[in-house]
Amino acid sequence: MDSKKEDKEKEMTGIPSMNGRVVESLDDSSPSVSSDYEIEIDDDLPLETSLEDALNDVLAQFEEEEKFNATAGQPKLTETPKTSTTTSIQNEPQEKVTTGALNPELLATRAELKRLENEKQEFIELLKRRQADFDNYRKRIDRDRAESFNRMVCDVAKKLLPVMDNMQHALEAQKAIDMSANPEFQNFVQGVELIFSQLSDILEGLGVKPIPTVGEKFDPHIHEAVTTEVNEEYAPETVTQELRRGYNLGDILIRPAMVKVSVKG
């Protein structure tokens, strides 16, 4: 009786049974079931119903696992890590190339560039020093030229001033002479006045100017006191009369003025 039942089960299912477990698929069209899935057959139910229920349970379990693996069971790999990994892998040899062993020609070029920059800086510093030296030289030349010019003017003025003094004395002396009776002498005096005026203009054009005297406070640096007098018209230590005109060239004293100074009575 039992052997007939087993033969009938083999004919209906085509699945060899061993201790109530299915180890192969039911037919060629049914999905393959791994040996990890176990089918428990209830002996109280008919065989066909038990096999169908067990197969449905396996298929449902299989589908649930597939859905779980597709969604939450296995996290999806994003493209960002791949990209970053690829980028880091690609950049890594480039960094090694740039920071590692450099091309000898590149090293030589950098060394030559550094040498040229240092040489350029040296030339700039040298140019600045040369420019400063040239400015100092030009200032010194201008100062020496001005001093030489003033010295020559002073020498010429010192030689002309005695002539100017004599002409001035002659003009002062003619004031005491009556020239109305002698028109020719009057013309001569006018000629002397003209020459004296021209010489004064020439010296003034060269920078030679007369030192102010009468009514000025006595200054020993530019005035030479020849005599003193009590004069109520002027305050003490005041120049009352010019005896000889003095001249200066800017800050240079060519000769002091001879003067008479008032004192207290």
Image (cartoon, rainbow, N blue to C red):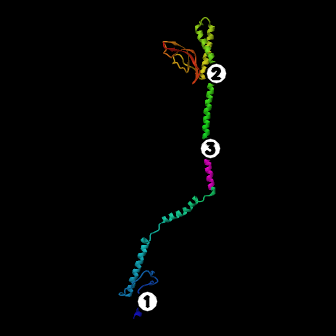
Q: Which residue is drawn at 41% across and 80% down?
A: 58
Tell me the distance, in whole angstroms, between the alpha carbons under discs 2 and 3.
48 Å
Label 1 neighbourhood size at 10 Å, few (<14), some (14-19), many (20+)?
few
Q: Which amino acid type is marked by label 2? A: Val
Q: Write down the residue under mark 3.
A: 123
Q: Is residue 250 visible?
A: no
Give above or below for 112 relative to 232.
below
Label 3 neighbourhood size at 10 Å, few (<14), some (14-19), many (20+)?
few
Q: Write down the residue under mark 2.
A: 156
- Answer with left or right where residue 242 lies relative to residue 47: right
Q: Nearer the viewer, residue 53 or 169?
A: 169
Q: Residue 113 lies in magenta, yes or no?
A: yes
What is the x, y in percent for residue 120?
Answer: 61, 46
Quadrant (top left/top right/bottom left/bottom right) for the N terminus: bottom left
Give above or below for 169 relative to 107.
above
Q: Residue 173 lies in magenta, yes or no?
A: no
Residue 10 is marked as 1
Helix, strand or loop at label 3? It is helix
Label 2 neighbourhood size at 10 Å, few (<14), some (14-19), many (20+)?
few
Residue 239 is marked as none
What is the x, y in percent for residue 260?
Answer: 54, 14
Classified by dominant secondary structure, the portion drawn in magenta counts as helix
Q: Which amino acid type is marked by label 1? A: Lys
What is the x, y in percent for residue 70?
Answer: 44, 72
Tell me the distance, in whole angstroms, between the alpha carbons under discs 1 and 2.
154 Å
Mark 1 or 2: the one toward you: 2
- Answer with left or right where residue 224 lies relative to residue 14: right
Q: Earlier along the polypeptide chain: callout 2 or callout 3?
A: 3
Q: Nearer the viewer, residue 53 or 197?
A: 197
